[in-house]
Amino acid sequence: MTTLTWFQRFDPVTKLLLILCLGLASFVIPTLTINWLLVFILFLLAISIGKLSSLVKILSFSLFFIATMIIVQGLVNPGNHTLLWRIEILNFYKEGVNYALLLGSRLLTIVLTTFFFIATTSVTENARYLESQGIAFKKVYMFISVCYILPQMMANLHQIKLAQRARGIGQQKSWLYRFKMLFPILVPLVVKTLDQAMTRAIALQLREYDNPQRQPQPLIHHYLLARFNHYLLSILIIMLGGMKVWLLIQK
Amino acid sequence: MQNKSTSHHPLWKITLSPATITLIPVAVGINYVAKAFAEGLKLPVWLGSLGTFLASMLGGPLAGAISGFTNNIIYSLTLSPMSGVYSITSIAIGLTVGLLFARGWFKTKKCILLAALVIAVISAVISTPLNIIFYGGQTGIVWGDTVFALLVGHHFPVWVASFLDEFMLDILDKIVVAYLAAFIYHQLPQRLISFFKKVR
Amino acid sequence: MAFNSKIVFSHVSVSYPAASQPALKDFSIRLTNKHIIGIIGNSRAGKTTLCHLLAGTLPKMVDGEVSGHYQINQWSPQQDWGVYNHQTGVVLQDASSQLTSFTETVADELAFNLINRGIQSQQIKKKVRRVAQLFGLTNQLTLSPAALSGGQKQRLAIASVIVTDPAILIMDDPTSQMDPRGRQIFFHWLQQTTALVFITSYEVDALAEVADELWLMDKGQLVDHGTPFAVFNRFTSPRIKHPVCWQLAKKMGWVLPTDGQSYPVNYQQLEEAFHAAQDS
């Protein structure tokens, strides 16, 4: 067996609970600096995993969105009164910008913890773990087939897009014309997909997917302290949730 | 011997039958393809709930709700982490479509328009607080956010501006999706419909 | 080889909801000790409906009104479905949709039915290697099923069904996407199997070689049945192809010496007829 990296020693449920826990924490922490410190630490962790190209992809959209929030909130937030910058005729106010930065830090906390989960667990690993925890294969099946359907549909779509390009659709034509293009391409694709789903549903039964004799497959990694982690994180989540409610009541 | 009982099943019952557990992944897949398709054609709508609509129509409100929920959870774990938050909206859309469909709201063109309006309102009502909590009221779509900024700049309450921002984007989308879903439903061969109706 | 099988159909009809014509009309047949039953006919002849009946998926999963009585060996596919299904292997018409779609490797896909039956993992490995070899998939074991060609997917679908050694096989046009080499591997394997086989196919040449019984269907009815030799020498419909051996022999006037008027339908008979023609 090859040596495991530190993040492979945690089971999928621990990782999911961690997402929830850190997400909640960023909502409870009121200080901008601590929130951004958290984001910074998570960012370093994300870099340490590797897979930089997908990290860049996932971050670029969030950063763009945070930029628009800073602009909109900095300009028009109802609580604005301390002028921060002045660019030509636009006045940016401190309250709005800070508010946008706070929301942005929360957004990035969720994005980065989720990235951590995606980048460190495979669908098979999740599926085997869930089944080993006594979850019926039916439910596990639903989870894994949803995960796999996206790449399959993307492949179908790629073909359609090639066909569209060959017909020169998508650039110059009017909206109405482009709406009409939905019918000859999207509609048959949807009907075909449903037909395949029917065949698959029949085949699953023929292949005895719900046979009670089914044995869960061995886990891919050996996890450290899985149960302990679940309890610890669940307690933390309850505490953080309680704190948030308390803070809301205090207001 | 004939399985006629399918149409008499209660609306709210759901079992994890093979038909359900294949219908839900497919609904998520259709949502994704429709969304990417709309982007590819540069249409002014998302179409990202087409699969959820169809799942509700074929499998009932609960199948639709589960499809919508699963859809956003999977999106948040694969494509855009924040979409998990809007799983609540997707659940509501799935439930509403299923209920309206069962009451025959998808039968005539006028009814579909009305149904789309109801769905858009419900979607916007649920999304608005989420937009306010997470994004200070914005939606992330430029022209909607421009309206938002203008309204807030003219001292409208944030929640009104945010609701209008969301509703404007939702209404056109839901009208197109509702007509498209109804059209596709009528194109489906009878054997497919009766197969998936067994979901309930 | 004598096969111990029993097939009974007694006045079986099938109607799909909202269809004007029944898909199967008054289908009756009674046979014993058959091995491979080839089912031929044009599209919409009722072949797929018959496969669904044989698999027990109609009316259990596919909606349809079924009347009459049918039985395969000691089982009624309708009443004893769970037990019966454990004995059968079914390859549906759209074989690539029959794959689970979530396994990461061909080996995992082949193991799926075995895992579901709670088989030991050592045995699973052995069985998977064996079927992979039988169907020429050994080099693909670590690939993703999605990466396979249409013909390879079809071979994978068949292999993942026969991995459990079913006693009854039901296959709906299982070679439609295969190249000639794949078809050859498949029909060669089919001849060796000890299962009772129902197979629909447009490959009349291969069926004439391997089948010991042929059912000719048209518009939901059983038009003729018997050995391939008997059936191909009886029917004249230009809409269904005859085996190449038959066509060639007819053109050349090579009749079989046994009755002096029938044409050969497979290679062995062709040889016989050819030598008879040479001698005379």
Image: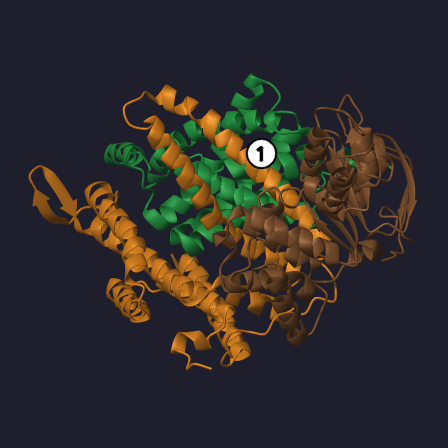
Chain colours: A orange, B green, C brown
Residue A66 screen position, x and y as percent: 26, 50
Residue C154 screen position, x and y as percent: 60, 49
Q: Residues within 10 Å of mark 1 (few under 14, many from 20)?
A: many
Whether A134 is drawn above or below A73: the answer is below
- Left or right? Give the position of C188 relative to C228: left
In the picture as drawn, the residue positioned furthest to the front comes out as C280
Residue shown at 24% from the left, 65% from the top = A33
Residue B133 screen position, x and y as percent: 38, 49
Does residue C241 appear in this view?
no
C122 or B28, which is in the foreground? Answer: C122
**Quadrant where the image shows the N terminus of chain C:** bottom right
Residue C148 screen position, x and y as percent: 50, 52
Whether C159 is drawn above or below C31: the answer is below
Snapshot quadrant of residue C67: top right
**Quadrant where the image shows the C terminus of chain C:** top right
Question: Does dot 1 land on a helix, a strand or a loop?
Answer: helix
**Residue ID for mark 1:** B97
A46 or A81, which is in the foreground? Answer: A46
Does residue B198 appear in this view?
yes
Whether A6 is drawn above or below C48: the answer is below
C188 or A72, which is in the foreground? Answer: C188
In the picture as drawn, the residue positioned furthest to the left comes out as A88
Residue shown at 42% from the left, 32% from the top = B170
- Left or right? Give the position of A156 relative to A87: right
Snapshot quadrant of residue A48: bottom left
Label 1 sits on what residue type? Val
Name the chain letter of the residue that bears numbered label 1: B
Count of labels in the image: 1
Residue shown at 56% from the left, 44% from the top = B26
